[in-house]
Image (cartoon, rainbow, N blue to C red):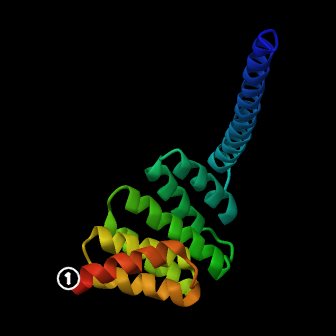
Amino acid sequence: MKENLPIIYISILLGLLLIVAILLFRQIIKSRRTESRFSKLQNKLQSQKGTAQEYYELAGIYLDKKLFVQAIQLLQRGLKSDEEIEPENKALMYNALGFAYFSQEQYDIAIRNYKEAIKLYPEYTIALNNLGNVYEKKQLITQAFECYKKTLEFDSKNTVATKRVQSLEKRLVAN
């Protein structure tokens, strides 16, 4: 038994190292793919006009990198592009704009963009949740509650809205 114990420990250690190596390798590949796409899009959009989808994709990468000003500029350029954008896709862009402004604590502009997204696509529950969140940040509890309730009308199993409605109900009753 004592002779097998070191073999078991080494086997477990090698197994853990193999798992860590695989996870690390997957993350490196994912990062390389993202950086490659980032570079291609950036080079293309600097030299010529792109599609709304390309602006949105590059802005998404900037948002992931927390470069909000650059993301805002790209999203605005994408919305102003000459091509016809479907309302659902335009709503995605306005929601991303709202998120970028929210992240910079420019809540009023974020609200405007979230409302524009909802106007284009009324069942857009993510934008409704985001709007509720920004209302909470501004201490507009009634409006936040209404946003979350509206989210639940479209998606009754939305966990974020369910938790926020329960929390805000307690706050509204207390007032």
User: What is the x, y in percent for residue 48?
Assistant: 68, 52
Residue 19 visible, this angle: yes
Task: Point out the image quarter for the N terminus.
Answer: top right
User: What is the x, y in percent for residue 140?
Assistant: 26, 78
Residue 80 visible, this angle: no
Q: In this view, does 121 lie above or below 13?
A: below
User: What is the x, y in percent for residue 123?
Assistant: 58, 85
For badge 1, the amino acid type reads Ala
Give the residue at the far top of this rendering. 3
Instruction: Count neighbours of disc 1 (C-alpha within 10 A) and say few if under 14, some if 14 to 19, many if 20 or more.
Output: few
**For the residue labelled by badge 1, is the local secondary structure a helix, a strand or a loop?**
helix
- Horizontally, is 173 left or right of 9 in the view? left
- Horizontally, is 30 left or right of 96 in the view? right
- Residue identified by numbered label 1: 174
Give the residue at the far bottom of this rendering. 153
Q: State the residue at coordinates (48%, 47%).
A: 66
Task: Point out the image quarter for the C terminus.
Answer: bottom left
Q: State the residue at coordinates (29%, 80%).
A: 170
Q: In this view, does 93 lie above or below 115?
A: above
Q: State the residue at coordinates (33%, 74%).
A: 135
- Residue 136 lies in what quarter of the image? bottom left
Query: Which residue is more in the foreground, 94 or 145?
Result: 145
